[in-house]
Image (cartoon, rainbow, N blue to C red):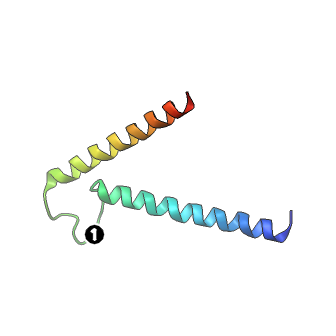
Amino acid sequence: MNVNQLINMVMRLFVRKAVNGGINAGMKRMAGGAKGAGAGQGNPGAAQQGQQAVRKARQAARVARRMGKM
């Protein structure tokens, strides 16, 4: 394994972690799990609706993956 392959492998690892962290943070924020300046403001039912939407989206993604395997 040469140096170029090692560098690419390490860079992919860091980029993957950064992208996954960003996606997870965005999903939590959209689901109403955000903590901070504006977390307590707004409609309290919206957070629950957001969480339900995330659950439905994840379930749809699971079903799509299952259908792709067939």
Q: Which of the image's four quarters has the C terminus?
A: top right
In this view, the residue farthest toward the left is 43
Q: Which of the image's four quarters has the N terminus?
A: bottom right
Residue occupying the point 53% across, 34% down: 68
Q: Work out whether residue 6 or residue 63 is closer to the camera in this orientation and state it.
A: 63
Q: Is residue 19 left or right of residue 56?
A: right
In this view, the residue farthest toward the right is 1
Q: Position of residue 16 (x, y in %)?
A: 58, 61
Q: Where is residue 49 in the image (x, y as percent from the top left)?
A: 21, 47
Describe the element under mark 1 as helix, strand or loop: loop
Q: In this view, does 55 lie to the left or right of 48?
A: right
Which amino acid, mark 1?
A: Gly
Q: In this view, does 4 lie above or below 34?
A: below
Q: Position of residue 43 (x, y in %)?
A: 13, 57
Q: Is residue 40 left or right of residue 52?
A: left
Residue occupying the point 72% across, 67% down: 8
Q: Work out whether residue 49 or residue 35 is closer to the camera in this orientation and state it.
A: 49
> Quadrant of the rendered structure where residue 37 is?
bottom left
Badge 1: few (under 14), some or many (20 or more) residues near its Cα, within 10 Å? Answer: few
Residue occupying the point 61% across, 66% down: 14
What residue is disc 1 on?
36
Residue occupying the point 27% across, 56% down: 32
Q: Where is residue 17 in the image (x, y as percent from the top left)?
A: 56, 62
Q: Is residue 33 above or below residue 62?
A: below
